[in-house]
Image: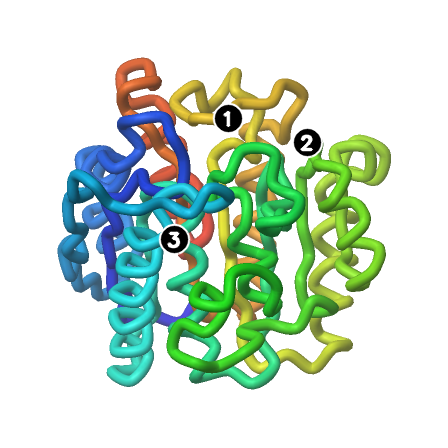
C-alpha cells in the first residue's frame, strides 16, 4: 500500500438542511480518533482544522426554494479553495462534514485538477434534486445535481469550472430513497445506480467489482468517494439526520472500503452527515473512523 500525505479538512456546517447538530460532525470524528487511526496505518496526516463558517446573519434573505443559499455558497467556495490547495501540495484531501451540501465545494475544488473524475456516491439518497424538484428546499439534497451542472447558477459556477463531473462518471451505491424528479434525472443523464435491491441481489462484492470495472472503462483520471453515513442502515449509524431503514450493513460497508483501497484508484474522499446530537455515545463517528481505517489500508493481519 502506498503511504499518503493526507490533508484533513473539517467543514462544520449545517446550512444544507434544517436539523441542528451536524455542524459538530468534524469534531466528533476527530474525537473518535481519525488522525491516530490513519497514522497507525502508516500515513502522514496533516489536520488543517476546520474551514471558517460564518454565523447566519439575522435578516439574511433566503431564496424560497433554496434554504441558506448565501451561506452554502460561502462554505462551498472556502472548501473548494482548501481542496484545490491540498491537491496543489500533492496531498490527499479527506473532507469531514458537516451536511452533504459540502460536496458542492469538494467537487468544485477537485474539478480543476481532474478532467475526467469518477465519483462513487455512497448514500441512501440520490442528492439530485434541483430548485424545481426539491420537496424541502434543503441544499444537502442537491450537491450531485449541482456538480453535474444543474441547479442554481451561483452554486453551479463556484470556481467557474462547469460541470465539475460528467454524469456518466457517477455511480450511486445504496440508494433507497429517491424523489420523482431525481428518478427522471437519473434516466435522462445516464447515471449508474445500485439501489439496495441490486446490493441485496448481487452482493457488495459484485457491485464493487462492476462499479470499478465500469469506471476503469471510462478511463477516469481520478476517483472521489462521497460517503454519507446514512448509506448504512441506521442500526449501525443512528446519528444521521435522514435515516432510512434497510441500508447497507456494517460489514458490507467495510468490504466496499477495502475494495476501493485495493483498487488503487482513489484520489480523494469525504465523510458526511455525522450528527452527534442524534447519536448514541458517538457510535456513528466511530463507524466513520472505522470505515476510514479500511479505506486507507488497515488490515486484521
Question: For residue 296, what is the image quadrant?
Answer: bottom left
- Point out residue 172 in the picture as x, y percentages from the top left corner: 67, 50
On the question of residue 168 being in view, the answer is: yes
- Point out residue 101 in the picture as x, y percentages from the top left corner: 43, 49
Numbered mark located on residue 242 in the image: 1
The answer to whether marks 2 and 3 mark residues whose Cβ atoms lie closer than 8 Å is: no
Residue denoted by label 3? 102
Numbered mark located on residue 177 in the image: 2
- Point out residue 228 in the picture as x, y percentages from the top left corner: 49, 41
Q: Residue at x 44, y 41 (%)?
A: 291
The answer to whether marks 2 and 1 mark residues whose Cβ atoms lie closer than 8 Å is: yes
- Point out residue 108 in the picture as x, y percentages from the top left corner: 43, 71
Q: Residue at x 60, y 27 (%)?
A: 249
Pointer 2 or 3: first along the chain:
3
Q: Answer left or right for 209 relative to 187.
A: left
In space, the residues marked 1 and 3 are separated at their CA atoms by 16 Å
Q: Residue at x 67, y 38 (%)?
A: 174
Amino acid at each position: 500500500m502506498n503511504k499518503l500525505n493526507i490533508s484533513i479538512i473539517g467543514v462544520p456546517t449545517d446550512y444544507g438542511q434544517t436539523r441542528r447538530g451536524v455542524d459538530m460532525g468534524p469534531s466528533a470524528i476527530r474525537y473518535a480518533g481519525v488522525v491516530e487511526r490513519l497514522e497507525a496505518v502508516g500515513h502522514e496526516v496533516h489536520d488543517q482544522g476546520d474551514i471558517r463558517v460564518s454565523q447566519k446573519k439575522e435578516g439574511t434573505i433566503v431564496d424560497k426554494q433554496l434554504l441558506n443559499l448565501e451561506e452554502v455558497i460561502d462554505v462551498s467556495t472556502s472548501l473548494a479553495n482548501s481542496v484545490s490547495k491540498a491537491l496543489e501540495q500533492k496531498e490527499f484531501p479527506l473532507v469531514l462534514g458537516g451536511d452533504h451540501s459540502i460536496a458542492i465545494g469538494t467537487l468544485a475544488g477537485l474539478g480543476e485538477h481532474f478532467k475526467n473524475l469518477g465519483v462513487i456516491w455512497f448514500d441512501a439518497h440520490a442528492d439530485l434534486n434541483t430548485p424545481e424538484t426539491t420537496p424541502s428546499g434543503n441544499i444537502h439534497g442537491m450537491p450531485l445535481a449541482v456538480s453535474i451542472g444543474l441547479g442554481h447558477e451561483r452554486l453551479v459556477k463556484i470556481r467557474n469550472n462547469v460541470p465539475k463531473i460528467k454524469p456518466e462518471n457517477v455511480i450511486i451505491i445504496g440508494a433507497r430513497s429517491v424523489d420523482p424528479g431525481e428518478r427522471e434525472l437519473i434516466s435522462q443523464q445516464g447515471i449508474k445506480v445500485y439501489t439496495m435491491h441490486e446490493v441485496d441481489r448481487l452482493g457488495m462484492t459484485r457491485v464493487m467489482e462492476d462499479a470499478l470495472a465500469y469506471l476503469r472503462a471510462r478511463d477516469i483520471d481520478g476517483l472521489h468517494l462521497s460517503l454519507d453515513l446514512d448509506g448504512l442502515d441506521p442500526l449501525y449509524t443512528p446519528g444521521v439526520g435522514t435515516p432510512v431503514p434497510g441500508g447497507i450493513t456494517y460489514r458490507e460497508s467495510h468490504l466496499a472500503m477495502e475494495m476501493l483501497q485495493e483498487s488503487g484508484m482513489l484520489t480523494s474522499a469525504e465523510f458526511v452527515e455525522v450528527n452527534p446530537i442524534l447519536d448514541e455515545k458517538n457510535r456513528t463517528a466511530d463507524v466513520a473512523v472505522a470505515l476510514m481505517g479500511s479505506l486507507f489500508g488497515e488490515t486484521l493481519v
